[in-house]
């Protein structure tokens, strides 16, 4: 079944090529297509395009389909082109001509737009909750190890004293900032495109504010041409925000792999979190973090792939946009999986508490020695020269006591402030608004 069929069969090879993976990918969108249809038919009744007594019949049938989709039992049958066609086919099969009324005032163009927006809103919520759990794990590990010193590096050269409190806390705050960028993307997502039809509106007196409220959107995509132009743009913006989170995870994973190596020996993983070698019996490989790094690096390439598809398209709809689905829809589950495994493994990391006892780390304390001399009244440049001369002559004796008190330093990690930053940004998403609207629509 095709919503656009005119009785002329399409060449079999052309049909296979143009449908592509739509049937498979549209299963991601099935519950959201049904929710969009529920809001749309409710609005159609309000403007007189569906009879009052027809609306509850349609809504009940759509709710039944929604439950199937939510339970994973919705299927797109062979010969049916996409999720939109399948929903209309099933409604028509059950309700006859009444099922054929639901497409009035819309196009598959704004149907897929609303499906993608609703799917992405929910998927972002899942990512935010997963990031929050990783942040909480990192903050707990930071507090637990706040007094354990470790080397800090610049240029991969021993630089200044750091601590595991600083290291864990750094990634917690990085992820909190990543949620800020994702919030900006979420605001772009959380605008209703329904009613833009094929990108040029409708001669029907549609009430677009009504569907906006029914679906819990914070705003409308007002201009109908721009609503269609948002296809591809929205996915690109969101994928950049997700890539930012993946970038933080990838950097963290690289650190763990480096610090876990025998040459560093800063951290270790329990045996059950490592893998072995087929010929080297001593190996305990941090494969979990290597795979997090690899998967997150792959995720960071997706924005460029989406950009390559959409960057030279003029206004209006083009079938090229179908390719974006294949890149975009699986992105959330891949990143969420990385976040889940990262949080689990980070909670089990054991830190080496005696790293700085090794002589090779003595020079970490040279800056603190310079600063001590400055406090005694020696000009900084002169103090720097004195310590440098001692190092050159092999006479430098470090004082391995670190007194850093300013905000964000070893002695003042500001973990409560980082936690507050995380909480504040998550509250700004206002997920409860969209949840309340959807629950009301389904009740």
Image (cartoon, rainbow, N blue to C red):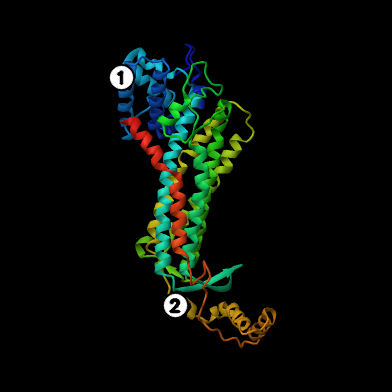
Q: Measuring from the top left, give residue 138's x and y in whole percent.
A: 43, 61
- Disc 1 residue crowd, few under 14, some 14–19, many 20+, Cα 10 Å: few
Let me know if residue 278 appears in the view.
Answer: no
Question: In the picture shown, does residue 319 fall above or below 51?
Answer: below
**Residue behind mark 2:** 354
> Of 309 and 119, which appears nearest the observer?
119
Residue at the spot of label 1: 57
Q: Secondary structure at mark 1?
A: helix
Residue 249, given in percent of the width and then of the height, sits at: 48, 55
Instruction: Residue 35: give x, y in percent of width and height.
Output: 38, 29
Q: Secondary structure at mark 2?
A: loop
Viewer-side residue, 353 vs 194: 194
Q: Residue at x 51, y 55 (%)?
A: 248
Q: Quadrant of residue 155?
A: bottom right
Residue appearing at x 58%, y 73% in the figure: 159
Image quarter of the N terminus: top left
Specify whether 23 is left or right of 440.
Answer: right
Write the residue at 34% across / 62% down: 272
Q: Is residue 373 above or below residue 144?
A: below
Mark number, residue 337: none
The x, y position of residue 38, in whole percent, is 38, 25
Q: Quadrant of residue 289?
A: bottom left
Query: Where 397 sits versus 208, above or below?
Result: below
Regarding residue 200, the answer to whether it shows in the image is yes
Q: Quadrant of the C terminus?
A: top left
**Which callout, 2 or 1, points to the residue nearer the camera?**
1
Mark 2 to mark 1: distance in Å? 71 Å
């Amino acid at each position: 079944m095709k919503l656009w069929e005119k009785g002329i069969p399409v060449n079999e090879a052309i049909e296979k090529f143009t449908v592509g993976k739509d049937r498979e990918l549209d299963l991601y969108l099935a519950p959201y297509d049904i929710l969009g249809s529920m809001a749309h038919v409710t609005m159609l009744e309000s403007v007189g395009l569906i009879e009052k007594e027809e609306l509850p019949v349609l809504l009940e049938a759509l709710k039944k389909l929604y439950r199937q989709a939510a339970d994973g039992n919705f299927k797109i049958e062979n010969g049916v082109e996409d999720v939109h066609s399948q929903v209309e086919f099933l409604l028509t099969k059950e309700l006859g001509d009444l099922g054929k009324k639901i497409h009035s005032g819309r196009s598959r163009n704004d149907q897929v737009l609303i499906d993608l927006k609703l799917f992405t809103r929910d998927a972002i919520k899942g990512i935010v909750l997963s990031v929050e759990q990783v942040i909480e794990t990192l903050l707990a590990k930071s507090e637990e190890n706040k007094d354990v010193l470790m080397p800090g590096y610049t240029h991969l050269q021993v630089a200044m004293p750091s601590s595991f409190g600083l290291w864990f806390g750094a990634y917690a705050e990085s992820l909190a900032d990543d949620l800020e960028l994702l919030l900006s993307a979420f605001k772009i997502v959380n605008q209703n495109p329904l009613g833009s039809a094929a990108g040029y509106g409708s001669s029907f007196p549609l009430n677009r504010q009504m569907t906006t409220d029914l679906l819990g959107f914070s705003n409308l995509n007002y201009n109908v041409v721009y609503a269609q132009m948002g296809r591809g743009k929205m996915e690109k913006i969101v994928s950049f925000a997700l890539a930012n989170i993946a970038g933080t995870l990838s950097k963290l994973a690289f650190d763990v792999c480096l610090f876990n190596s025998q040459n560093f020996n800063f951290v270790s993983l329990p045996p059950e979190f490592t893998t072995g070698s087929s010929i080297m019996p001593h190996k305990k490989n941090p494969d979990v973090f290597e795979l997090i790094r690899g998967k997150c690096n792959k995720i960071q390439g997706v924005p460029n792939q989406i950009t390559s598809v959409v960057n030279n398209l003029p206004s209006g709809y083009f079938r090229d946009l179908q390719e974006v689905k294949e890149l975009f829809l699986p992105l959330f589950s891949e990143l969420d999986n990385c976040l889940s495994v990262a949080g689990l493994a980070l909670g089990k990391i054991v830190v080496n508490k005696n790293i700085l006892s090794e002589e090779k780390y003595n020079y970490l304390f040279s800056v603190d020695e310079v600063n001590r001399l400055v406090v005694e009244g020696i000009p900084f440049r002169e103090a720097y020269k004195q310590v440098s001369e001692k190092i050159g002559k092999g006479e430098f004796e470090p004082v391995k006591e670190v007194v850093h008190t300013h905000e964000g330093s070893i002695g003042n990690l500001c973990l409560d402030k980082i936690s507050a930053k995380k909480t504040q940004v998550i509250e700004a998403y206002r997920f409860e608004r969209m949840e309340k609207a959807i629950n009301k629509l389904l009740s």
